[in-house]
Amino acid sequence: MILDTVLAFGLVLSELAQLRLSIVPLGPGELCLLIWCIAMLARAISQHPALKITPALSRLLVFWLLFVLAQ
């Protein structure tokens, strides 16, 4: 329930780019979405300790890593 709320706040606040502080590159929406992504990733890893990285998963992870770095 808490993660659902964080996701909802992140989606709503991500449109409010003018709330960003000049010294912080992330706004409140991006920060909520980042917290949600990290929490969901930690939950997925804790529920499946024998998670195997397949070639398809590694390609997907590389793609998203490059996408994040490009942003």
Image (spheres, grey):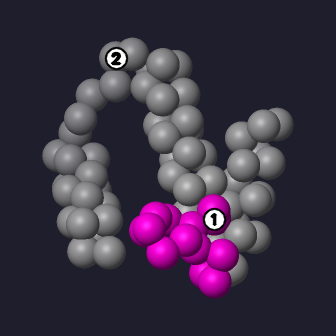
Looking at the image, which is closer to me, 44 or 56?
Answer: 44
- Could you say whether the residue bearing mark 2 is in a helix, strand or loop? loop
The quarter in which the C terminus is drawn is bottom left
Asked whether residue 28 is drawn in magenta, I would say yes
Residue range in magenta is 17-29
Q: Quadrant of the N terminus?
A: top right
Decide if residue 45 is on the left or right side of residue 51.
right
In the rendered view, does 23 fall on the left or right side of 28?
Answer: left
Quarter of the rendering containing residue 11 = bottom right
Report which quarter residue 69 is drawn in. Answer: bottom left
**Label 1 residue SS:** helix
Number of the front mark, 1 or 2: 1
Residue in view at x 75 percent, y 59 percent: 9
| Residue 16: x %, y % from top left | 68, 79
Q: Which mark is residue 56?
A: none
For the residues labelled 1 and 2, the Cα–Cα distance comes to 32 Å
Tell me which numbered mark, 1 or 2, is placed earlier along the sequence: 1
Q: Which residue is mark 1?
A: 29
User: As displayed, is residue 28 above or below residue 44?
Assistant: below
Task: Say which residue appears at 44% left-offset and 68% top-offset.
Answer: 23
Is residue 64 covered in magenta?
no
Residue at 66% over, 76% down: 19
Coordinates of residue 62 in the picture (x, y in percent): 20, 56
Label for residue 50?
2
Residue drawn at x 29%, y 70% is: 67
Q: Main secondary structure of the magenta part?
A: loop
Instruction: Tell me the amino acid under the disc marked 2.
Output: Ala
* Residue type for callout 1: Gly
Q: Position of residue 47 (x, y in %)?
A: 52, 19
In the displayed structure, 34 sits above or below 50; it is below
